[in-house]
Image (cartoon, grey):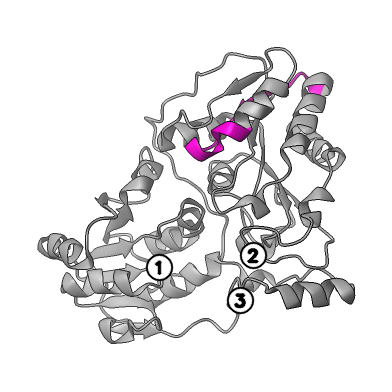
Amino acid sequence: MSDTPQNLLIRGVNWLGDAIMTLPAITRLREALPMTRFTLLTHEKLAGLWEHTAHFDHVLTFAKSESPFVIGKRLKPEGFDAALILPNSLRTALEAWHADISRRIGYAGNWRSPLLTHAIAPRPEAIPMQKRVAIDIEFRLINHLQPQTFPATAHHIHQYLHLAQHLGASTQPLAPQLKRTGDVPAFSATKQPRPYIGLIAGAEYGPAKRWPTEYFIETATQLIEQRRAHMLLLGGPGDQDIASEIADALPGDHHTNLTGQTTLPELVTALASCDAVLTNDTGPMHVAAAAGTPVIVPFGSTSPDLTGPGLPDDPNSPHQLLRTTADCSPCFLRKCPIDFRCLKEITPTDTVAAVKRVLDQQA
């Protein structure tokens, strides 16, 4: 595009992990448009993610109950001259259309192309996370197929970089990084000796993403006994039962359970303060990695090729991504329809060794 926007609206995505995966595109946009004012429009539940960060000049929020018309009417006086719409929904295109923003850039499809001034065709390299049906799972198991893998170019950070290039941004990928400001509060919930190991045993998407609770307990117990590690249990309110079960089973006072007790900015600070984080494939996994903390992640029903933390296919990655050999992986289902073999085969022995590798690299 020939005209450089002066007042850019970026419509953010609605999930925590996806929000982190948009950061490379935001960074590249900042490089390309250093004089442009960046305003983020985000769901109010994610507003805290951007506290103490320097990615945007201004952050606007909306509530789930607000209609696209109401949001557009509220945006109109802001005088935006361009909108980069990162989600693919009809609703988000309607918001920018009702705001009468002259340039509206987003992916085509979902009945929204007429609402966009620049409807971008899907990337040829994009691979949708299509849930497997029962007959497909059965076929793969009977024929002993290998777990499906994908090229690095299929990773979701490329989806957002591809959109950003239509405002002049480079598509060269880089690891998501939360650019924190100098007024970030220090984490002080525990004064225990290091190392701090974060544990995130829940997963909002569903149980198919959750490594067995007893495996978390066994891993944490071994790390306490062998490394005198202090376990920091973290997660959202929906993870409290699992975290309490883990905390009750751990020896001594080598743990602090903050699950469901932190705000989003506090969660970012706590994750950044850990030496390593053992986590399921969750939003906080992406936050920890972007905050500079190595993560150890058992992957079963999902694929690190598509939504893994950090820079895709990075030979120098500090993260330990543990893959299953289950034939039916990845299935992308919320609940496992068979025997949960994908995550059960990744053992505490595997994760203890992976955590030790991370800690030894820091020594």
Q: How many marks?
A: 3
Residue pictured at 65% horizontal, 46% vertical = 280
- Where is residue 183 drawn, in percent x and y? 37, 30
- Label 2 Cα crowd, 10 Å radius (few <14 / some 14-19 / many 20+): some
Q: Which mark is residue 87?
A: 1
The image quadrant that residue 94 belongs to is bottom left
Give the residue at mark 3. 127
> From the viewer's perspective, is 65 left or right of 349?
left
Mark 1 lies on a secondary structure that is loop
The image quadrant that residue 294 belongs to is top right
- Where is residue 345 drawn, in percent x and y? 85, 51
Q: Quadrant of the C terminus?
A: top right
Give the residue at mark 2. 332
Residue pictured at 72% horizontal, 73% vertical = 134
> Which is more N-terminal, label 3 or label 1?
1
Q: Quadrant of the N terminus?
A: bottom left
**Amino acid, disc 2:** Phe
> Which is more N-terminal, label 2 or label 1?
1
Badge nearest the viewer, 3 or 2: 2
**Amino acid, disc 3:** Ile
Mark 3 lies on a secondary structure that is loop
Mark 2 lies on a secondary structure that is loop
Residue pictured at 69% horizontal, 24% vertical = 195
